[in-house]
Image (cartoon, grey):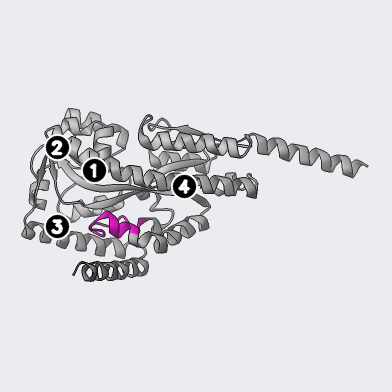
Amino acid sequence: MLRILSFVLLMAAMSVSQASTTLRIATLAPDGTNWMQLMRQAATDIQQQTDNRVRVRYFPGGVQGSDNTVLRKMQIRQLQGGAVAAGALVNIANATQLYSLPFTFRDLDEVRAIRDEFDPYIIDALAEKGFVVLGMSEGGFAYLMSNKPLRTSEDVRSQKVWVPEGDIIGQTIFTNGQVQPIPLPISDVYTSLQTGLIDTVAVNPSSAIALQWHTRLSHATDFPLVFLFGMMVVDQRAFNQISAEDQAIIKTIMRDTFKAMDRQNEMDEAGAREALLQNGISFVELSEADQAAWYELAEGAVSDLADRDIYPVGLYQQLQQRLIEHRTNATASDE
């Protein structure tokens, strides 16, 4: 009888635990953006479809600190998850940098042509380190934006260039171009643009507008440097406390939400570029010679990063081969 009573009490305790599971997820994304609206709808859907067994609580706008701070808070279980830039995960799994090397992609079609094959490598690498990936978001291409036209690396050397805190790839690219970048958390960028601590950033158009950085800048170099990716990760320990049935519900809702988000991001990026033009930002075109010089600089950075094991070299070469095949097929279909 005592064993039966103990079993009943244990089941009741587990039921209560399931009913009160809350995933606390932090992000730098400002509240009110399309991204956050989609995320909040996903949280509502998760709560409803799990009959209140799982709730998601967001902390937007960087209130929990930088991406690196969020990851540290996840380690000590103050947070269960974070929506962070891919660069923040470089010291956890180098596969997360697979899409982040300079000039890897020429357009969005190329990004989407390889994701089905290569996303699983990133997801599996993070799983080995105790993280569950709930989604990967396409942030668009980053462009150099400044208070003067920038065409060559020599032009950039006279500038005070920002890189995100802990961004090893960005730091290496600029250092190889004999530029000493200034690392800062995203929360400090706007104030630093105001005070003149920095005058140049690499950012995608929609973020430049959402964060109001464009109000302090006048030119954008019309040559995309890198494609930006974000990832929503949760602590495997916290996720394992959720039943398998509810885990499947969460993953399905988040998968669909991130697909919708990618479609929204694509529209936002196109609209943001037009908005920048309307707000007086001049897009600076580069000559073929200038473009070739940037490619050469990037090749040196990619080589240095390979020596430091910042990205999985063999896997990246495989990705490059898939892109060559995609470009060949695209050219053949156009003829």
Q: Mark 3 points at which residue?
A: 294
Q: Answer whether labels 4 and 3 touch (C-beta < 8 Å).
A: no
Q: Residue at x 14, y 48 (%)?
A: 222
Q: Real-space Cα distance between discs 1 and 2?
A: 11 Å
Dot 1 amino acid type: Ala
Q: Real-space Cα distance between discs 4 and 1?
A: 22 Å
Q: Which portion, as a residue range, is magenta?
A: 97-112
57 or 32: nearer the viewer: 32
Q: Name the residue under label 2.
A: 277
Q: Real-space Cα distance between discs 3 and 2?
A: 24 Å
Q: Is mark 2 on a helix, strand or loop?
A: helix
Dot 4 amino acid type: Asp
Q: In which quarter of the image is the C terminus?
A: bottom left
Q: Answer whether labels 1 and 2 touch (C-beta < 8 Å).
A: no
Q: Where is residue 81 in the image (x, y as percent from the top left)?
A: 49, 41
Whichever of callouts 4 and 1 sits on the residue coming sooner in the sequence is: 4
Q: Real-space Cα distance between discs 4 and 2?
A: 32 Å
Q: Mark 4 points at which residue?
A: 256
